[in-house]
Amino acid sequence: MIKIAVASEGKMVTEHFGHCENFNIFDAENGKIIKSISVPNPGHKPGFLPNFLNDMGVNVIISGDMGSGAVEIFNEKGIEVITGASGDAEAAANNYLSGSLKSTGSVCHEHQHHDECGK
């Protein structure tokens, strides 16, 4: 089984990983989503969310954009990071499962929390 987390605003992929409203978590088996839940974002603190999602057993994180600090922590934990996604969260998860969603490697360097973006 694979567990995919999509940083979201409701059911749509969000631009800003750390400031998302919720995470849509999809459990997939044999390339198909078998279960989905929405988990509220517990709060944006540097380094917290990657550990929070790791503790939930997430294997893949999908977001529009993400700070380099978060990317590094996910990489250390062996969690695949896909950035540059947009649109419907479940569609993004399905596109990942089918192999059609590729990461753009988009890493955030400019927003109001520049000190948390690793620049």
Image (cartoon, rainbow, N blue to C red):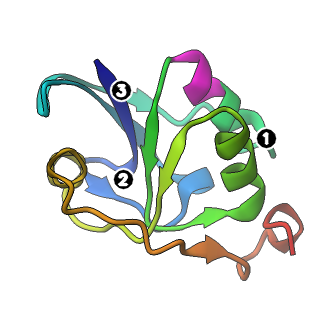
| Amino acid type at image mark 3 | Lys
Image mark for residue 47 = 1
The numbered mark, 1 or 3, whose residue comes first in the sequence reads 3
Question: Is 54 left or right of 13, judged from the image as shown?
Answer: right
Q: Which callout, 2 or 3, points to the residue nearer the camera?
A: 3
The numbered mark, 2 or 3, whose residue comes first in the sequence reads 3
Is residue 119 part of the magenta span, yes or no? no
Is residue 55 part of the magenta span, yes or no? yes
Q: Which residues are magenta?
A: 52-56
Local secondary structure at mark 3: strand
Q: Residue at x 30, y 68 (%)?
A: 86
Image mark for residue 3 = 3
| Amino acid type at image mark 1 | Gly
Task: Look at the image and tell me in which quarter the C terminus lies.
Answer: bottom right
Local secondary structure at mark 1: loop
Residue 43 visible in rendering: no
Q: Residue at x 22, y 65 (%)?
A: 87
Task: Look at the image and tell me in which quarter the N terminus lies.
Answer: top left
Q: Is residue 108 above or below residue 27?
A: below
Distance from the alpha carbon under mark 2 to that under mark 1: 20 Å
Q: Residue at x 13, y 25 (%)?
A: 30
Q: Which residue is mark 2?
A: 9
